[in-house]
Structures are given as C-alpha cells and as structure tokens.
Amino acid sequence: MIARKGDSSTEFPFRYAALMSTATEHYAHHLGPVYCWMVGDLEAASARATSELDALGLPKHAHGVAVDLGAGFGLHTVPLARRGYSVIAIDSCQSLVYELQRRAAGMPVNAVAGDILDFTKYVSKPVEVILCMGDTLTHLPERDSVQHLFADVASLLTMGGLFVATFRDYVSAPLQGDRRFIPVRSDDDRILTCFLEYGEETVTVHDLLHERVNGQWQQRVSSYSKLRLLPEWVAARLGELGLKVRTGNGPAGMAMVVATKG
C-alpha cells in the first residue's frame, strides 16, 4: 500500500496490481466482488435481458438445451430457464457463479466456473441456443481462440439453432483523448471509472475503483487486455462455418452478431 502525502483530510491511499491481469484474474480479484453493484438496478437489468431474448424471437415456452457463455450472475441464464430451456451457464469468475446459483435455485440450470473455451465438456447433446453476451467475446486471449470457439458453436448447434454474441467494437471508432476515460457507476461510497489504451490488436482496460473504507477513500487499480474485433470479421468467421449471419446494434452500444445453423 502506498499513500499520497498531504493534508490528512485529502490523504488518498491507493493500490495497483503488480502486473496486467488476465481477464479471469481481473474479474476474480477486482470486478467480480463489485459486479452486481456495477450493474445497478438488478430488476431493471433482468427486465432488459428478457426483452433482448424476446427481440431475438426466442419462444416463450421452449424445450431443449441453451448455453450461456460468460453468464456472470445470470442476467440471461435466468430468463432462458424461465422459458423452459435447460441452461448450461459458464463463467470464469467463481463469485459470480455462486451468485448465479443462488438466483437460479430450483431452475434447470447447471452453473459452472470454468473457461468458456472448454464449454463442450459440459454439453452432451445438440444445443438450440448459445449466447455470448456482454462483451465476453473480447475477453478471449487471441483471435485463434475466437475461431476455435466459433467452430465448437457451429458443431454443437442443432439445425435451426441460434448463436448470439454482443461485444464492444473497439475497432471502428477508437475513443480519443479524454473520451477514453469512461465513468461506469458511482454512489456515496464507491466510484468506478475505466480508462482505455489502444494497441494494434488489443485494447488495455484500466479499471479504477475508489471505495470509502472506515471513512477514508481508497483506490484500487487493475488492468487487463481485450481483443479489438470488427463485427464484420466476426460475421465472416461464422459465415465460413456455414452459418447464416446478420449483424446489428446490440444493447448498451454494443455490436450484435446473430448466426443461425441451416
């Protein structure tokens, strides 16, 4: 712990991660513990997630298997289960998986803490729906991993099955100057801001978390790398696997790619 020296009323302890984290480490130690707070009104967020599934044309009363990759605490998992799907929900952050299990208690949900690249280990039969929402896709370590994931998706979908990914387009219009500082959420005791640094193939995300502890503000900083994926590139890779693909605008300013088998 390092402390800035100065007037005691403005003394501001802060801590940095020693090295840039992987996405898994970043969520386990930095964002995971505050993720539900970061989302804000969970009921409103759940209602939006349900509306997103409605907009995709998913049946209100469904059967079969759905997979939620990067499921978090279950924003899409729970409404999928309420529709009647048996859901395999995978996330690398154990604390979020625990929360998902709590929220989905009594529902047909198998919540797994693991790598989404290994999702085929948990699937025993063809799948009707596979979701990869909320910028999860950019958390993969390299483009080869994305293509590996897509190949598994294409092989496991039933005929007529649906794959949907939403992710941030860090390619088409990179933020410049002060616009790279993005306020995420704040209240009287916590402030979360992120800062973006663009590289050729990746963008480094620095998450600055300020928390009031025992009446004093403390800062924690952790950074991790995300892939810069062009929606057209994602669509082309899925198309090469024989899927019918369309692109569009997703929630919260994200890009959306929807692919259908057959």
Image (cartoon, rainbow, N blue to C red):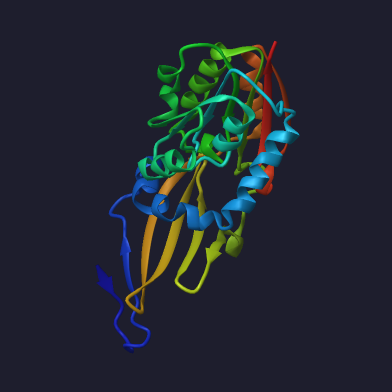
For the point 41% across and 23% down, the residue is: 118
Would residue 177 be seen by someone viewing this image from the given angle?
A: yes
Residue 179 in which image quadrant: bottom right
Q: Position of residue 237 (x, y in %)?
A: 61, 21
Q: Position of residue 183 (x, y in %)?
A: 56, 63
Of residues 120 and 110, the one drawn nearer to the viewer in this rendering = 110
For the point 71% across and 29% down, the residue is: 60
Q: Position of residue 79 (x, y in %)?
A: 61, 36
Compared to residue 134, the image places residue 146 above or below, namely above
> Quadrant where the N terminus lies?
bottom left
Compared to residue 192, the image places residue 228 above or below, namely above
> Quadrant where the C terminus lies?
top right
Would residue 195 be seen by someone viewing this image from the given angle?
A: no
For the point 47% across and 51% down, the residue is: 205
For the point 54% across and 13% down, the residue is: 156
Of residues 13 and 195, the one drawn nearer to the viewer in this rendering = 13
In the image, is 219 to the left or to the right of 133? left
Q: Residue furthest front?
A: 106
Residue 110 in which image quadrant: top left
In the image, is 28 to the left or to the right of 51? left
Compared to residue 35, the image places residue 146 above or below, namely above
In the image, is 17 to the left or to the right of 115? left
